Amino acid sequence: DADVTQTPRNRITKTGKRIMLECSQTKGHDRMYWYRQDPGLGLRLIYYSFDVKDINKGEISDGYSVSRQAQAKFSLSLESAIPNQTALYFCATSDLGGSQETQYFGPGTRLLVL
Amino acid sequence: SQELEQSPQSLIVQEGKNLTINCTSSKTLYGLYWYKQKYGEGLIFLMMLQKGGEEKSHEKITAKLDEKKQQSSLHITASQPSHAGIYLCGADHGSARQLTFGSGTQLTVLP
């Protein structure tokens, strides 16, 4: 079984709709991240959480919100989806250990906003 | 991110050929990560480099870190179709352990 899972894997929605992307992990990591990937722009950080009570904005948080329901769950919401939020969304986890942390990624959610 | 430049953006090679992908940072590197992404899939961690001059290998993939140049290179020897995908570098610039990613290199290996 995958350590980091994302649901749904694909989603088509209409402009103005509210949608939620979910991420679950079984790695026992404290840190979780949401990224979006657009062609030619690489990965950009939306939000991150270092533990259940900690939420931080990333590079491109406008139009998004998150909820850290438990150590294992981190969800991303688009309150009112717009077409330029069409992208591939990744959740990642990492653990504080040593001087460096490796981030482990989920399989991604492909979102299309019409 | 402009803080992290990858080159080339895309690369097409014949099976069996060697190739190199570069990742250059405009800021001090505290750690440099290499990931591979296949279409429709998530990112697979390949290796992490931390110290200047460090070199790591995984099967036929070798990565080096030149701390002075703030650059890392990923070298694939005797490429195979299974090496095809998008290679991304991610940098720790010392900002609360967040990673900044390059825009990726699309590698195609022709059989």
Image (cartoon, coloured by chain):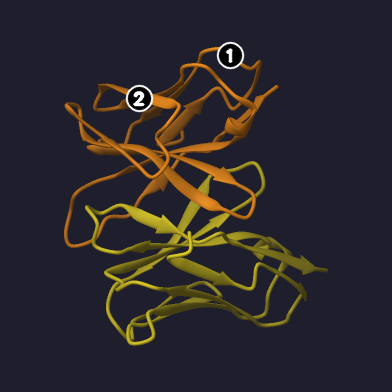
Chain colours: A orange, B yellow
Residue extending farthest right: B111
Mark identifier at residue A88: none
- Look at the numbered disc 1 and give the secondary structure of its residue: loop
- Do marks 1 and 2 share a chain? yes
Residue at left offset 36%, top offset 39%: A33
Compare marks 1 and 2 and give the one earlier in the sequence: 1
**Mark 1 vs mark 2: in front:** 1
Q: Circle 2 sits on which residue?
A: A66
Q: Is residue A75 visible?
A: no
Label 1: few (<14), some or many (≥20) within 10 Å? Answer: some
- Choose between B109 and B94: the one closer to the eye: B94
Q: Nearer the viewer, residue A35 or B109?
A: A35
Q: Nearer the viewer, residue A108 or B15?
A: A108
Give the chain of mark 1.
A
Residue B30, horizontal then vertical, whole percent? 26, 69
Label 2 is placed on what type of residue?
Val
Residue at 83% of width from left, 68% of height from top?
B111
Q: How many marks?
A: 2
Q: Is residue B105 left or right of residue B90?
A: right
Q: Amino acid at mark 1?
A: Gly
Gap between marks 1 and 2 measured at Cα: 18 Å
Horizontal side of B37 relative to B72 (left or right) equals: right
Q: Which mark is residue A16?
A: 1
Secondary structure at numbered mark 2: strand
